[in-house]
């Protein structure tokens, strides 16, 4: 059974940092690109960042470029989102999600499994 | 960036009625190399993560009831629920995965029972 489990969320002041972790199981981790997708309270879905299965390709939404860094450790079946210089508008539930099937790079397939999400609140 | 526009924002239908949700992309998501539309539909119930319903515009994900169907090509797409059930109350999102990132979602359509 495929499982994705996020951790590391919480309350942080503006300008602060957090690192989110997504632990994956139930599939061949290195074969799948993965992404972080967020949802502000009462709002729609916003893609944040993606990383290819090998980890050599990363992409970011303009809203987080230069502040967030995505990475993965295929030996631990885990991927991460390091979030720096956090702003009020980064407050959201953050979901990790895996792409359906294999493709070179990232962002070429839809998401067939999602974690339950973890809340990040940026507030003073 | 490809902008995805959904309509309506919400709809309320009676049980057993047909519900139709539209999604329009600002540019075509049809690939000329493989003739596939890079368009997916998700269902999100309150307090839950999104669930993949449809991909390649019309392929139903495993386990999804056959009352859900997707159609369309190029820039115009439709998700149809042929006979609305109580458990279908949710917000539905379309997503394109055509362009070399960013991936983009529609604004969502809330489906309720009248």
Image: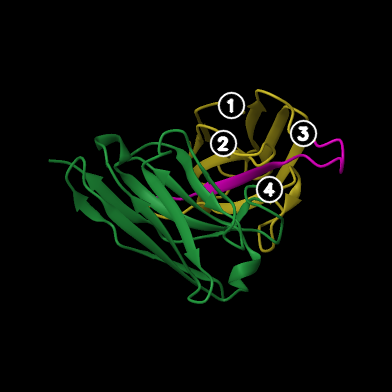
Chain colours: A green, B yellow
Q: Give the percent coordinates (x, y) of residue B92.
A: 54, 41
Q: Residues within 10 Å of mark 4 (few under 14, many from 20)?
A: many
For the residues beneath circles 1 and 4, the answer to whether they share a chain is no
**Helix, strand or loop at disc 2?**
strand
**Label 4 sits on residue:** A108
Residue at image mark 1: B3
Q: Work out whether residue B84 can be spotted.
A: no
Q: Chain of mark 2?
A: B
User: Which of the two discs, 3 and 1, sits closer to the camera?
Assistant: 1
Q: Quadrant of the N terminus of chain A?
A: bottom right
Residue at which label 3 appears: B72
- Distance Cα–Cα, label 2 vs label 3: 18 Å
For disc 3, the chain is B
- Magenta stretch? B31-46
Relative height, residue A65 to residue A115 (above, below)? above
Q: Is residue A74 left or right of residue A86?
A: right
């Amino acid at each position: 059974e495929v499982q994705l489990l996020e951790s590391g969320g919480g309350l942080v002041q503006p300008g602060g940092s957090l690192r989110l972790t997504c632990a994956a199981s139930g599939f061949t981790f290195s074969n799948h690109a993965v992404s972080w997708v967020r949802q502000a309270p009462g709002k729609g879905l916003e893609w944040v960042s993606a990383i290819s299965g090998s980890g050599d390709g990363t992409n970011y939404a303009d809203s987080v470029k230069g502040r967030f860094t995505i990475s993965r450790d295929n030996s631990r079946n885990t991927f991460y989102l390091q979030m720096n210089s956090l702003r009020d508008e980064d407050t959201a539930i953050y979901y990790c999600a895996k792409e359906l099937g294999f493709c070179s790079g990232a962002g070429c397939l839809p998401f067939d499994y999602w974690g339950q999400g973890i809340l990040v609140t940026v507030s003073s | 960036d490809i902008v995805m526009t959904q309509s309506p924002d919400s709809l309320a239908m009676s049980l057993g009625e047909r519900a139709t949700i539209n999604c329009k992309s600002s540019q075509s998501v049809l690939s000329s190399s493989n003739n596939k539309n890079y368009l997916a539909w998700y269902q999100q119930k309150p307090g839950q993560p999104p669930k993949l319903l449809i991909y390649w515009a019309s392929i139903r994900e495993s386990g999804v009831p056959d009352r859900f169907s997707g159609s369309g090509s190029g820039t115009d797409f439709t998700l149809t629920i042929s006979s609305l059930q109580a458990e279908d109350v949710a917000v539905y999102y379309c997503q394109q995965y055509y362009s070399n990132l960013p991936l983009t979602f529609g604004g969502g359509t809330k489906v309720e029972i009248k």
